[in-house]
Image: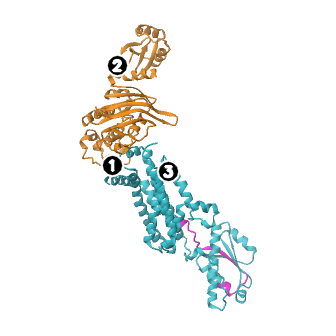
Chain colours: A orange, B cyan
């Protein structure tokens, strides 16, 4: 299979901050590849390197078979890039923005309309409206339309769903799924673990290093211990109590429950008693299936 | 080419959609011309003058009438002795006292020389200088007419070069070239530097860079709209000066417009250069205002003559493009000279323009930092 991106040993630092450290990965053609990691983990720097906006200090990267340093001019024609910060012209209308990006890339809106019709149809009723007055979700859809309008072979989306409501986020991922049929490779970054499931493969990134790359399923399966969820009415008291207990390896809050791993994996009964003695008598302990975030936290522990 | 036109179209949309930009582009120049023309006028009109005539003869009477009838002065009081001078100044209405010595007329006829003192109120130095200059001019005129009509040929001429090209002593004319110079460099440099840094600040530059647009296209696309608008601005300023102050353009209008285009281009390239070194709009505005406006006002010869400055300021001002442009357009508008007399200044501006363009293209980053 042809590789859309091939990176080996990429290093990049800003002053004394190491933004990327020995990053190597490859992305297959027409797959959706997600980079998951917290803020400041190096996702944006990596994406800017892929889009030829930053030069790596060390390492080699080929995107669509072209070198990011030497062939940047040719490469830029084939990339659709949506930066993390909303970057359309707020004082232009929806339609004007789209037309502008179409002309700049030497095409017209009509020519590639079928590609964006699914997405653009949502905002088309507002096409005369100034972009600055759109809602967050609509802005993202417009930005995606603009990034797609020249039918790029590679779509680079830097945190496209940050600051967007849950419904719009879900819609957005549906649209990305539909783009598969056009043979467009998509790399996308997100701080939301729940979105990782929608990628073909994900790379977990932390402090400029890639912790693991695999399909979302395999990453979940990589979780090495038994996971329990603990619930109680007084969550704060519960987590303090759990973290005091030497038999507890990890205790992280997840929504309304706490994910816990135990040194002795059959000790969940003992734990219940311990909590009762500590004044928490409504605790419920259940065995649970690990999610990507659990695995991510585990990998971070190992680091 | 289509890409480029699309980019230019987008720039025009930005400009026309932003009322503030439009106001800065057209409102401020018009306001400045009117303000400088009317309010900061250095003309004197009906300035209060008192007379102390110790001679009381026909000649002093004639000269007094001539001074008063010039329209610049108004007689406030007739003094009787030197002690009154201090008092009359303290009343505030009198800006100068003109004193004819005893036997003024007799001396003038017999010796061909008579002395007249002008004591001006130094608390307003500008007016004081103007009044003394004006009076001196009137007195010269008077002695010349005397010389022409009588046998007396001892004519005292005190040359006042500044008024030579401005015989009616209208100061508005002097401000028009200065205002054009100031406005063009300010608007061109400020606008282009702000519009480019705005793309950086809003993150749109990131997307523009990851597009097939070449740096030259981005820069030219930014420059062309402002070039056109600034040129319209020049026409507007000239039309306004002509309509309101009846400013005549003595030299070739085509030469004047061509020089203006050169200066606009120079200012625009300076703006691009500023944008390549500043990261935020605020920085760009700061550099344009402090780095360009103040030196242009203070050091370019716009208000204060360079000849009167200490040498060090003279050297500093010689790196300021406005200095040369002021010379060029003053020559064309007021003196009506041709390219022959201003080719040196024109050449300096061309060299500066090329240098700024070269530096900006070299400094323009095709990647992020």
Same chain, labels 3 and 2: no
Please tell me which residue lies in front, A78 or A178.
A78
Secondary element under disc 2, as helix, strand or loop, is helix
Q: Position of residue B10 (x, y in %)?
A: 36, 52
- C-alpha span from label 3 to label 2: 54 Å
Q: Quadrant of residue B166?
A: bottom right
- C-alpha span from label 1 to label 3: 26 Å
Q: Mark 2 sits on what residue? A: A221
Q: Which mark is residue B115?
A: none
Q: Position of residue B69 (x, y in %)?
A: 59, 80
Q: Which mark is residue A104?
A: 1
- C-alpha span from label 1 to label 2: 45 Å
Secondary element under disc 3, as helix, strand or loop, is helix
| Residue appearing at x 45%, y 45% in the figure | B201
Please tell me which residue lies in front, A203 or A273.
A203
Secondary element under disc 1, as helix, strand or loop, is helix
Mark 2: few, some, or many residues within 10 Å (few <14, many ≥20)? some
- The residue mark sitting in front, 1 or 3, is 1
Q: Position of residue B341 (x, y in %)?
A: 51, 72
| Residue appearing at x 35%, y 21% in the figure | A220
Q: Mark 3 sits on what residue? A: B284
In reply to whether residue B55 is colored magenta, the answer given is: yes
Residue A191 in the figure: left or right of residue B309: left
Quadrant into which the N terminus of chain A falls: top left
First to last magenta residue range: B38-62
Q: Is residue B302 above or below residue B204?
A: below
Q: Position of residue A88 (x, y in %)?
A: 37, 44
């Amino acid at each position: 299979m042809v590789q859309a991106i091939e990176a080996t040993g990429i290093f990049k630092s800003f002053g004394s901050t190491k933004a990327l450290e020995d990053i190597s990965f490859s992305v297959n053609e027409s797959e959706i590849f997600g980079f998951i990691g917290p803020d400041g983990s190096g996702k944006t720097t990596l994406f800017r390197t892929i889009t030829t906006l930053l030069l790596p200090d060390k390492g080699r990267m080929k995107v669509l078979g072209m070198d990011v340093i030497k062939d940047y001019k040719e490469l830029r024609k084939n990339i659709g890039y949506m930066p993390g910060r909303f970057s359309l012209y707020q004082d232009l209308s929806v339609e004007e923005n789209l037309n502008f990006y179409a002309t700049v890339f030497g095409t017209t809106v009509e020519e590639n309309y079928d590609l964006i019709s699914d997405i653009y149809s949502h905002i088309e009723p507002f096409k005369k409206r100034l972009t600055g007055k759109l809602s967050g979700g609509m802005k993202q859809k417009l930005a995606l339309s603009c990034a797609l309008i020249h039918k790029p072979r590679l779509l680079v989306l830097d945190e496209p769903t940050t600051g967007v409501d849950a419904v719009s986020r879900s819609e957005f991922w549906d649209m990305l799924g539909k783009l598969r049929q056009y043979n467009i490779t998509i790399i996308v970054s997100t701080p939301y673990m729940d979105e990782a499931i929608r990628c073909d493969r994900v790379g977990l990134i932390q402090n400029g290093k890639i912790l693991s790359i695999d399909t979302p399923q395999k990453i979940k399966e990589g979780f090495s211990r038994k996971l329990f969820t603990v619930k109680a009415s007084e969550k704060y008291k519960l987590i303090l109590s759990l973290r005091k207990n030497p038999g507890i390896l990890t205790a992280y809050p997840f929504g309304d429950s706490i994910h816990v791993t135990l040194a002795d994996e059959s000790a969940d009964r003992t734990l219940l008693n311990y909590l009762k003695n500590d004044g928490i008598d409504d605790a419920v302990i259940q065995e649970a299936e690990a999610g990507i975030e659990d695995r991510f936290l585990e990998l971070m522990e190992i680091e | 080419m289509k890409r480029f036109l699309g980019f230019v179209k987008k720039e025009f949309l930005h400009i026309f959609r932003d009322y503030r930009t439009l106001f800065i582009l057209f409102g401020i120049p018009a306001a400045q011309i009117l303000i400088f023309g009317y309010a900061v006028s250095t003309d004197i009109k009906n300035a209060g003058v008192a007379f102390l005539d110790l001679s009381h003869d026909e000649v002093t009477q004639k000269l007094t009438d001539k001074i008063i009838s010039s329209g610049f002065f108004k007689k406030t009081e007739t003094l009787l002795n030197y002690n009154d001078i201090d008092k009359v100044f303290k009343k505030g209405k009198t800006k100068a006292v003109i004193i004819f010595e005893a036997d003024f007329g007799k001396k003038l006829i017999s010796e061909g020389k008579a002395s007249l003192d002008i004591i001006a109120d130094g608390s307003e130095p500008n007016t004081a200088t103007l009044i003394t200059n004006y009076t001196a001019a009137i007195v010269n005129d008077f002695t010349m007419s005397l010389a022409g009509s009588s046998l007396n040929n001892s004519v005292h001429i005190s040359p006042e070069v500044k008024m030579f090209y401005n015989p009616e002593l209208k100061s508005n004319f002097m401000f028009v070239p200065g205002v054009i110079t100031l406005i063009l460099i300010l608007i061109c440099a400020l606008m282009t530097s702000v519009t480019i840094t705005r793309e950086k600040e809003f993150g749109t530059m990131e997307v523009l860079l990851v597009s097939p647009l070449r740096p030259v296209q981005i820069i030219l696309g930014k420059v062309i709209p402002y070039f056109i608008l600034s040129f319209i601005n020049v026409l507007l300023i000239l039309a306004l000066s002509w309509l309101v102050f009846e400013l005549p353009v003595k030299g070739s209008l085509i030469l004047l417009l061509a020089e203006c285009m050169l200066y606009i281009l120079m200012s625009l390239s300076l703006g691009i250069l500023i944008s390549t070194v500043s990261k935020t709009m605020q920085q760009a505005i700061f550099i344009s205002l402090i780095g360009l406006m103040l030196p242009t006002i203070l050091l370019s010869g716009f208000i204060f003559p360079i000849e009167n400055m200490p040498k060090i300021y003279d050297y500093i001002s010689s790196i300021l493009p406005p200095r040369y442009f002021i010379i060029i357009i003053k020559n064309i508008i007021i003196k009506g000279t041709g390219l022959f007399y201003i080719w040196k200044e024109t050449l300096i501006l061309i060299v500066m323009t090329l240098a700024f363009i070269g530096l900006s293209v070299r400094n323009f980053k095709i990647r992020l930092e």
